C-alpha cells in the first residue's frame, strides 16, 4: 500500500492514501517535484545554449590581429580582467609638487572629503554604467585609498600628457608604477584585478585617459603581477573616461581613429570619430566628446554579456528577425551576417532607453565588424553616409540600408523592438 501511495502522491493523486504521515509525505514529495522541475529547466537551458553555440559558430569570427591584442574577434585574451562575477579594482589618487592637492604633509578633513566626493562622482558613475551594460553579470568592487599620494617626480618632466601614443603610454606607466609603489605599504593588492590612478584636478597637464595592458606593461605589488591599469585626469567627464579605459581592461578595442590627433581643445574631432560617431562607448561621440551610449551588441557578445541564444546568425536569405531594444535585458539582441572569414554585418535595435536616452531618433542600427583590423583603425564601422555617424544612421519604419548587394529593411516597429528583413545578392 505504501508503494502505491508514493506513486500516487508523485503524480498528485492523493485521494485514498490516508496515513498519519500524509502531510509530511506531501511536503517532501512536493519539494522533490519542485527540485526536479528546476533541474529540468536548467537542463533545457543548457541544451538551448549548446544548440545556439553551434548555430552561431559561423558568426563567431576569430581574432585575426593577435591573441594578446585588443580586437573585435573571439576570444578575448584571458590576460584581460573578467567580464562577469566580481572584479576588484584599486583606486589611487595622486598629486604633485607643482600641483598639490593639499597644504602641508597630511590631508585635512576637507581634502579627505574632496577625495571621497571625486570617488563617488567619477568612479561610482563608471561602475553603474558598466554593470548596466553587462545586464548585471559584472560586479565591480572599487577599493579606494582615501589619501593623496605625492608623486616623487616633476609633473611636467615625467607624467604630463604627450602628443604621441607611445609618449602617453610611458608617462602613464611611470605615474601608475610610482602610485602603486607609494600605496603598497598600506594597501593590499593581493586580489586586485586592475588599478585606476586619478590625478588631482590641479594637474592641468593630465587630461587624457590611458589604459596599459599586459604583455606590454605589467605592474608588481604584494608578490603578484597586475596586467591591467588606467591613469587619467579628473575633468568633468572623467567618469566616462574611466568607463572607456576599463573597457580596454575588459578587452575592447578603440573604435575611433587613433591616427587623427585631438582638436585644439583636447576633444575628439569629427575625423577622429568617423568610424562609429555617437555609437559605442569605445568610439568618438557627439561634437567630438566621449559619450556613454549603450555598448554595441557585438561587443557585449564578445564579453559574454549576451548569450548565444540572443544572437541570430543568418546564412540563408531572405530572413526576418524580431529584435528587442539593446537597453532591455532578454530577447534577440543582434542579427549577424557573416560576409568573409573576418567580416560580418550586424543589426541591432536602439531606442531612447537606458544610456541611449539622448538619441534624437530610434531604429535599427547596421554596422560592419572586421576582426583583422587593429584597435583604433576601424574594426567596427557604422553603415551610414554621415561622417561621423549620428542618429540619422538609425533605420525607421520602411527604411532600407544597402551595401554590396546586401539589404536591411525595417518591416515593422513595435514597442517591443524592430522586425528587420535581410536579403543577400
Image (cartoon, helix red, strand yellow):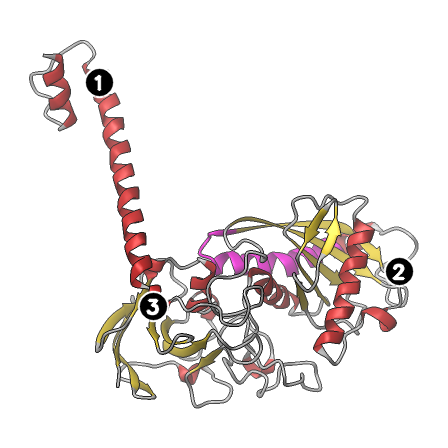
Residue sticking out furthest to the right: 104
CA distance for labels 3 and 2: 53 Å
Badge 2: few (under 14), some or many (20 or more) residues near its Cα, within 10 Å? few
Q: Which is nearer the N-term, disc 2 or disc 1?
A: 1
Q: Which residue is mark 3?
A: 58
Residue sticking out furthest to the left: 16
Q: Residue 45's spot in the image, x, y percent?
A: 29, 48
Q: Main secondary structure of the magenta part?
A: helix
Left or right: residue 71 versus residue 15 is right
Q: Which residue is mark 1?
A: 25
User: What label sits on residue 152 in the rendered view?
Assistant: 2
Badge 3: few (under 14), some or many (20 or more) residues near its Cα, within 10 Å? some
Quarter of the C terminus within the rendering: bottom left
Q: Nearer the viewer, mark 1 or mark 3?
A: 3
Residue 90 seen in the figure: yes
Q: Nearer the viewer, mark 2 or mark 1?
A: 2
Q: Residue 395's spot in the image, x, y percent?
A: 34, 81
Q: Element under label 3?
A: helix
Residue shown at 43%/90% (left/top)?
Answer: 385
CA distance for labels 2 and 1: 73 Å
Q: Element under label 1?
A: helix
The span picked out in magenta is: 115-138
Q: Nearer the viewer, mark 3 or mark 2?
A: 3
Residue shown at 66%/67% (left/top)?
Answer: 238
Residue 222 versus residue 247: which sits nearer the camera? 222
Residue sticking out furthest to the top: 20
Badge 1: few (under 14), some or many (20 or more) residues near its Cα, within 10 Å? some
User: What label sits on residue 195 in the rendered view?
Assistant: none
Amino acid at each position: 500500500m505504501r508503494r502505491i501511495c508514493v506513486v500516487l502522491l508523485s503524480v498528485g493523486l492523493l485521494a485514498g492514501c490516508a496515513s498519519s504521515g500524509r502531510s509530511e509525505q506531501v511536503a517532501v514529495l512536493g519539494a522533490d517535484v519542485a527540485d526536479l522541475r528546476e533541474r529540468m529547466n536548467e537542463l533545457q537551458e543548457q541544451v538551448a545554449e549548446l544548440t545556439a553555440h553551434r548555430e552561431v559558430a559561423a558568426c563567431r569570427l576569430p581574432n585575426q590581429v593577435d591573441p594578446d591584442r585588443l580586437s573585435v574577434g573571439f576570444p578575448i585574451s584571458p590576460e584581460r580582467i573578467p567580464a562577469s562575477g566580481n572584479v576588484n579594482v584599486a583606486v589611487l589618487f595622486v598629486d604633485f609638487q607643482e600641483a598639490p592637492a593639499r597644504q602641508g604633509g597630511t590631508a585635512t578633513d576637507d581634502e579627505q572629503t574632496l577625495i571621497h566626493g571625486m570617488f563617488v562622482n567619477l568612479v561610482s558613475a563608471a561602475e553603474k554604467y558598466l554593470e548596466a551594460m553587462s545586464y548585471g553579470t559584472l560586479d565591480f568592487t572599487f577599493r579606494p585609498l582615501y589619501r593623496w599620494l605625492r608623486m616623487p617626480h616633476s609633473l611636467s618632466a615625467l607624467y604630463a600628457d604627450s602628443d604621441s601614443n607611445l609618449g602617453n603610454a610611458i608617462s602613464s606607466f611611470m605615474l601608475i608604477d610610482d602610485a602603486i609603489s607609494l600605496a603598497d605599504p598600506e594597501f593590499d593588492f593581493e586580489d586586485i584585478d586592475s588599478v585606476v590612478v586619478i590625478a588631482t584636478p590641479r594637474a592641468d597637464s593630465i587630461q587624457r585617459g590611458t589604459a596599459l595592458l599586459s604583455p606590454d606593461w605589467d605592474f608588481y605589488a604584494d608578490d603578484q603581477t597586475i596586467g591591467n591599469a588606467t591613469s587619467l585626469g579628473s575633468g568633468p567627464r572623467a567618469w566616462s573616461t574611466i568607463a572607456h579605459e576599463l573597457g580596454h581592461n575588459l578587452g575592447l578595442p578603440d573604435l575611433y581613429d587613433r591616427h587623427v590627433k585631438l582638436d585644439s581643445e583636447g576633444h575628439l574631432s569629427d575625423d577622429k570619430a568617423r568610424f562609429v560617431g555617437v555609437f559605442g562607448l569605445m568610439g568618438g561621440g557627439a561634437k567630438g566628446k566621449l559619450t556613454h551610449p549603450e555598448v554595441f551588441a557585438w561587443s557585449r557578445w564578445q564579453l559574454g554579456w549576451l548569450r548565444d541564444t540572443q544572437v541570430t546568425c543568418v546564412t540563408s536569405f531572405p530572413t526576418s528577425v524580431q529584435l528587442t531594444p539593446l537597453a532591455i535585458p532578454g530577447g534577440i539582441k543582434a542579427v549577424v551576417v557573416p560576409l568573409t572569414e573576418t567580416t560580418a554585418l550586424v543589426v541591432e535595435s536602439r531606442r531612447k532607453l537606458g544610456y541611449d536616452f539622448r538619441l534624437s531618433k530610434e531604429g535599427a542600427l547596421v554596422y560592419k565588424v572586421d576582426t583583422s583590423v587593429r584597435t583604433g583603425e576601424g574594426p567596427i564601422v557604422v553603415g551610414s553616409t554621415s561622417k561621423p555617424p549620428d542618429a540619422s544612421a538609425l533605420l525607421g519604419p520602411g527604411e532600407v540600408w544597402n551595401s554590396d548587394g546586401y539589404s536591411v529593411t525595417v518591416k515593422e516597429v513595435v514597442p517591443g523592438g524592430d522586425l528587420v528583413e535581410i536579403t543577400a545578392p
